[in-house]
Amino acid sequence: MSSMSSVAGLSKYIKTLPKAKFSIIGMLIISFIIGSAYYLIDLNSEIGIFENIIAGGLFGLTVFGISSIMSGALNQQTISIVHGINLKIKHSMFLSALSMTILGIIIIIGGIISQILQLNLFLNSMLFGCVLVYGFNTLVFWATSKVRFMTAAFTGLIQPLLILAMYTLVTFLFIDTSFLGPIILQITIKAIIAAIIFVMAIYAFIKVIASPFKKNLGIGVLDLLSLFIAHMNEGSNSLEGLFENMSEAIDTIVTFVSFKTEKGIKALFISPSVHPGPLGDLGGSNMPTILANKFDHFTMVAHGPSTHDFNPIAVSEIDKVEKSVRKGLEKVEYSSNASKFVRYASQKAKIGVQLFNEGMVILSTFAPDAVDDIEFGVGLTMMAQSRNHCNVKDSIIVDCHNSFTPESGEILPGNSEVFQIIEVIDTINPNQEKHEVKVGCYEDTMETLDKHEGIGDSGIKTMIVEVDNQRTAYVLFDSNNMEMGFRQEIIDAVSDLEIDEIEVMTTDTHTVNTLSRGYNPVGISKRPEIIEYVKISIKEAIKDLEKVEVGTGTEKIENLNTFGPKNSTELISTISSVVAVSKIIAPVLLITALLIAFIWIFFGGL
């Protein structure tokens, strides 16, 4: 499992929140329940149970519900005025509802303890809950809205202040005016000191975890978090600007096979050594679709040998890949010569090989065993080895990326899989007969499926290559890998169709990784429906078969701005270390601060 995608797994914590109206309705209902529950615990024997429920409900609705709804609106407006991000009205209302619920639970627990100890702990419980809400709101605003600490601390005061003010007003007007002076004094002194204690602990915690990011990467951890959330919630690509501060320019290559008729290019099969990541629509995550759409003809963008180190830092970097492909197409020499598709295997390594004119395509897979990306250096070795062994000009290496488990590891220099790949390349017969070639194409966006089923924007693309009456289906899903075993299930399901060979590939698009899982391979669900799409695509591509000429190319991509080997590793190691340290520091700092605030509020006199 690649480190970058492990981090992408954090996206499962970004949920779609309910609309503002549902949060408002929830606050009205929950606040009524909180008030009723407290009044039933602290039962007034002078009136009946029903009257206690109604009186308590109205008290809770007024003190907690109305004030929290007001704070939801004011929080959003305040953050908007200071040009903060991410806090839409639905987010603000949900935060107020969640904070109010936390406060209500603390008050109810305080009421139960009051009855056991025969003490009046309502005010202290409410103060402690308000301090907790203040710290929680401050942390959320500071961490997610890209605002300064003081702005977040000021905005975080709105909800607890409104609740305390509403409580003071209701007490003065309807309950007992004789306690107005002592209430204000207690609220002011206890709340200020407790809030300072708690919020300073939060400040210290954030500063501790922010230091490694600033030192190692030159970026702010809260900027990273805020912009990441903005991308997940709104599709904002502002995070790419942050990536520029840690980008590294590299040189890599793109290889391709071009099929043309008298009318021009019919199909283009591209394998760029550029990784389609990191996730969502950031950087090169949607490269397979974006790059394919830059050409007017049928274009398949397969997964070339590359890891997350080669993630483009911006969508605009994909233009450099396109430019290199077009430059290479100008040099292509075409002929009608192609060999049959032949499979070779050595231990776990398996390849499907087909020679086209002066080049060859190698489809690499370890299925049914699971592996992740093939590192670029390993891919270069495969190219050099196959070119020398088969005496060809171009070697188009494709990482089929079609067998996944969460434990899948990358193929890196020194891994045993590298030697297995080299061994299997050495078994290729370089003297295969060449014949005329036909090609048929079909693509379908698979509209009944979407990212929830691991299907990206390009859906499925199928190319049938016919050589000497042998038909080979190249089936490419716009997906991030494939659930282990699904490849073979597809192969078995199409065995009765008019084809002789088939290989199933995925583009490794990371646009599908913004849902409940960091990984989202195709084949987790709706397998029969997906297989039906494969069958249809093969049948339709066969209908499209026609004679073509074929040519291959290899072109260098220069100055591609990517995460880079150094920064990619640094980012992951920094995040990993911060997460590890936070597991220790966060409980120590925050629990200590809460304990001090608790002691001060409940046992500090006044």
Image (cartoon, rainbow, N blue to C red):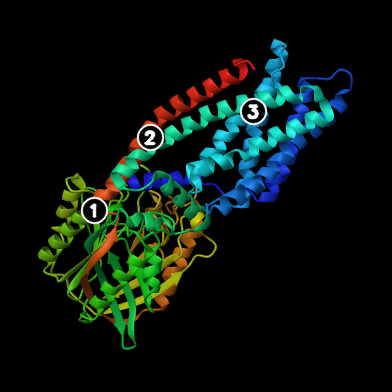
Q: How crowded is mark 2: few (under 14 residues within 10 Å), some or many (20 or more)?
A: some
Q: Residue at the location (29% across, 74% down)?
A: 323
Under mark 1, the amino acid is Glu
Compare residues 376 and 189 and report the one nearer the observer.
189
Per the model, the C-alpha gap separating discs 1 and 2 is: 34 Å
Q: Mark 3 points at which residue?
A: 188
In the picture provided, is 528 more to the left or to the right than 295? right
- The residue sitting at the bottom extreme is 262
Mark 3 or mark 2, which is nearer to you?
3
Per the model, the C-alpha gap separating discs 1 and 3 is: 61 Å
Q: Looking at the image, is 174 positioned above or below residue 293?
A: above
Tell me, for residue 420, which label it has, or none. Answer: none
Percent coordinates x, y for residue 77 in the rendering: 62, 51
Q: Mark 2 points at which residue?
A: 208
Q: Is mark 1 on a helix, strand or loop?
A: loop
Compare residues 409 and 442 and report the one nearer the observer.
409
Q: Which of marks 3 and 2 is nearer the N terminus?
A: 3
Q: What element carries label 3?
A: helix
Under mark 3, the amino acid is Thr
Q: Earlier in the sequence, mark 1 or mark 2?
A: 2
Percent coordinates x, y for residue 499 in the rendering: 36, 68
Q: How crowded is mark 3: few (under 14 residues within 10 Å), some or many (20 or more)?
A: few
Percent coordinates x, y for residue 506 in the rendering: 37, 59
Callout 1 touching callout 2 (CB < 8 Å): no
Q: Name the residue under label 1.
A: 375
In the picture provided, is 533 more to the left or to the right than 158? left
Percent coordinates x, y for residue 436 in the rendering: 24, 80
Mark 1 or mark 3, which is nearer to you?
3
- The residue sitting at the right extreme is 47
* Quarter-of-image position of residue 577: top left
Q: Earlier in the sequence, mark 1 or mark 3?
A: 3
Viewer can see residue 386: yes
